[in-house]
Each structure stands twice: as C-alpha cells, then as structure tokens.
Image (tube, grey):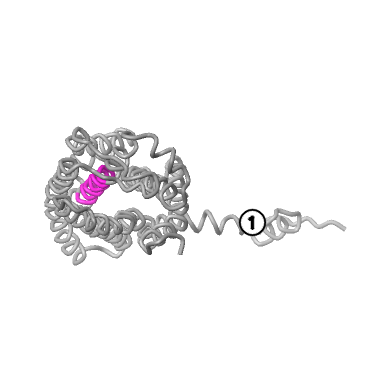
Amino acid sequence: MLTPTWQMDLFIYQTVILIPIYIVLLVDFVVSRRRHRTFQTPYYTLMISQGIADIATISVFSSLVLARYFSFGNLFLYSLRPFMPIFYANSGPMMFVMRIVGVFLITIQRYLTVCHSHGPWNFRLNHCPPLLLILFHWTLGTLIYLPALLHSDATFENEITLFIMTAGIHAQVFSVTVATSFATIGLSIIIMYSRIAVTMVRARRTVSVSKKSTSMQDARLTLHVFILILFCIICFLFYLGEFVLSFDEDRTRLKAFRLYYPTVSGNFSFINPVMLLTLNKDVQSRLRVMFCGCFISPPKVTTVSMATKKSTSGGPVFTTC
C-alpha cells in the first residue's frame, strides 16, 4: 500500500489513471470547437467548465496528499498558517458547490434542448458566448459559498498529519451552505428531470427513423447528467454527516469519517471522464480519430495509382515503356 488507508490509495490510483485522460478530453473539446460545430454547443462549454472544477478539486487535494503522506512540502504548507489550512478547509466544500452548480446548469441545458428545443430560452443559450457561460458558472458558485468564506477559521493539527482542524462555526456554516444550495438545486433538478423523462417517453413513440440516432444521443447525454446527480447526492450525504459530527467535542469520529472524503469527492470528479468515454458517441468518434488516425497513414499517390484511378473512371491511361 502507498498510504495507511485504502481510501487514499484508491484516490491516488484513480488520479494517475483518469486525470490525464480527463485533461486530454477537455483539451480536445477546446481544440475541436473551431472545426466541429458539435463541440461549440453550450453542453460542451459547460462540460469544459465542469471539468476545470473537477481537475481543480483533484489538484488541490493531491497537493495535500503529497505533503501528508509523502512529506513533500509538508513543512512549507505548515509554515503558511493560517492561510493554507483555511484554503484547504474551503477548497473541498467550495468546489463541491461549484460542481453541483455545474450539474445544475448542464441539467438546464438538457431540459431546454429536450423539452423546449425551439423555445426562445434555448435559442439564447445556444447563442450565449462560451466565456460568459463559464464566467456565470464560477461566479454563481462563488456567490453561493461566500457566507462560508466569510466565516473561515481553521488550522493544521501538526506538521506531520496536516489534519485540518476547523472551528465549529466554520464547519456548521459551510455545511449549512452546502445543504441549502444542494436542496434548492436538487429540487430544481428533480422537476426538470421529471419533465425530461416525460418528454423523451412521448417522443420515443412518435420519433421517425431518421431522428432515432439524435434521440439516442440525447438519451445518453441525459443519462450522463443523471449519473452525475447521483454522485452529487452521495457527496451531499457526506457533508451532511460531517455537519452532524462537527458538534462533537471529541474529533475522533470526525477524523475517521473524513477518511472517506477522497473516495466520495474524488469519484464525483472521476465519474465524468468515465461517462464521457462510455456514453458520449461524439467523444468516442474523436478518440478514434485521435488515436487510430495516428497509426493509419493515407495511401501514397504514385503514377501507377493515378493510372489505375483514371482507368476505372473511364479516363485515358498512359503507360510508359
């Protein structure tokens, strides 16, 4: 084992395997936007924004893992008190809020695409500048978490474990912030998904053969977002448990409970590239082009091949002696 706990080992292995794949996918989304209209849609813009939040979450926690379990920069981080413990204490819940806001915005996009494809709001969303959409995502998430930022109070237990000791008021405020935002957003998502489900069931009965592929793609993208919502719920339950344990004067149970943070929060980020690879046909097509195209070289144009082509097309054939 790399670390004393299986949760941390799992997080490290998942990070090493999935994050490079995730980065490749996001970079390809950005590069492909110029040539493929598919990747210019708000869905992929929000996926890029969500991917940035996912990678930021993993990167921040990975730096703490390196310091805590491999003594890489632990003394340096400990010397930066109280800034670094406050930073790490807020990064997890704030990035969770940022990610559930991203899921909420992606759900809105799916709802407008499936239920109101010809409506004015879908038209405005499709013509919204990508940078403005990303800026709105991050601004909204920051504003939601702002009350917890204003009540930040945390410190490291010591320079070896770097366990983050948060004040009771801080833990309670960010837990309430996360719970309130999730409850509000979750209710909205449930309403939108119920409408999406009804619309897709009705459309399946009347859809023509020519539109079946589009409907299946919409169904796969909707399933992708639904799975993200399930992992949102799991992450929310974790923060709810942390809120309950924050009232204990003895931090033993809280320490034991936080061992599951990398598994819960990490899988919320790691599930996205897995779903992109398994459910998204556009991504699968791009991967085939990226990797298969590197090994399949175009045929060389020679005099013989040109003569053969002309002969098959009925044109004159010139031979040389």
The stretch drawn in magenta includes residue 211: no
- Locate residue 106 relative to residue 169 in the image: left or right: right
State the residue lying farthest toward the right: 321
User: What element does badge 1 sit on?
Assistant: loop
Asked whether 133 or 266 is in front, the reply is 266
Please report the residue visible at 17 percent of the width from the left and 64 percent of the height from the top: 201
Please report the residue visible at 35 percent of the width from the left and 61 percent of the height from the top: 7
Residue 98 drawn above or below residue 19: above
Please report the residue visible at 29 percent of the width from the left and 65 percent of the height from the top: 209
Asked whether 307 or 158 is in front, the reply is 158
Q: Is residue 41 visible?
A: no
State the residue lying farthest toward the bottom: 205
Prevalent SS, magenta region = helix
Residue 77 drawn above or below residue 236: above
Mark 1 crowd level (few <14, some 14–19, many ≥20, 10 Å Cα):
few
Asked whether 116 or 286 is in front, the reply is 286
Q: Quadrant of the N terminus?
A: bottom left
Asked whether 31 or 69 is in front, the reply is 69
The stretch drawn in magenta includes residue 105: yes
Q: Residue 45 occupies which quadrant of the picture?
A: top left
Please report the residue visible at 25 percent of the width from the left and 34 percent of the height from the top: 139
Query: Residue beneath label 1, please?
Result: 297
- Locate residue 279 relative to residue 287 in the image: left or right: left
Residue 113 picture location, percent across and down: 23, 49
**Magenta-colored span:** 93-111
Q: Is residue 239 visible?
A: yes
Residue 103 picture location, percent across and down: 25, 49
Residue 134 picture location, percent across and down: 31, 37
